[in-house]
Image (spheres, grey):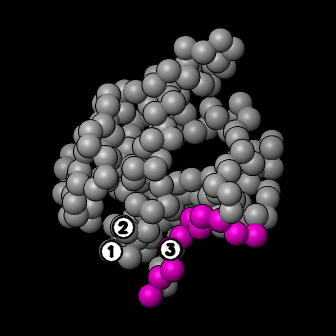
Amino acid sequence: MRKLIYSLSVSLDGFIADRSGAIDWSAPDPELHRFFNDQARGLGAELYGRGLYEDMQAWETLDQRPGATPEVVAFAKLWRATPKVVFSTTLERVKGNARLVRENAVDEVRRLKAEDGGDLAVGGAGLAASLIPHGLVDEYRPVIHPFILGGGTPFFPPLEERISLELVETRTFGSRVVYVRYRAR
């Protein structure tokens, strides 16, 4: 059975974007970018909500821009090669290596997890919020940046019941960003 992994950059107070939607505070340095690239290798698919899918479309050509770093070039190639499943009721179509699912994300993710293949990564707090209460996320991997935003888009949704986790791994980067990996019990 494939694992479903939820990993995003977050502020110390648990937000993935500030109140205006900005994420500039979470821009990775080369070391962190290489780590993100390593995490993306071997994924069976990326699962996106509409908003993050639209934001990630820039990766179709970012490696072709003058001055693209080796990390950007590597991630763009990985991103284009990785299959994507986009959950949206408003999009008419998706491009590239993606397919559109219009309804019932919970059932579709259950089906995807039961298939053979590499692990799945859920991208976007809204999509993750629809899956977490159903116990579908197997690992939580926040990448904690040294900022307190005081509000914005939360990494976790409000929950009716607590989720017990087991710490599997930690890593501190030169930029003082901290990666933690928890497995749901």
- Which residue is outermost to the bottom? 160
What's drawn in magenta, residue-wise? 150-160
Crowding at label 3, few (<14), some or many (≥20) Cα neighbours within 10 Å? some
Mark 1 lies on a secondary structure that is: helix
Badge 2 amino acid: Leu
Name the residue nearer the viewer: 82 or 174: 82
Badge 3 amino acid: Pro
Q: Percent from the top left, x then y, of residue 129?
A: 43, 68
Q: Earlier in the sequence, mark 3 or mark 2?
A: 2
Mark 1 and mark 2 residues within 8 Å of each other at the beta carbon: yes
Q: Where's the C terminus, which quadrant?
A: bottom left
> In front of the other: label 3 or label 1?
3
State how far apart marks 3 and 2 are (Cα).
Answer: 10 Å
- Kindly identify which residue carries mark 2: 131
- Kindly identify which residue carries mark 1: 134
- Kindly identify which residue carries mark 3: 157
Badge 1 amino acid: His
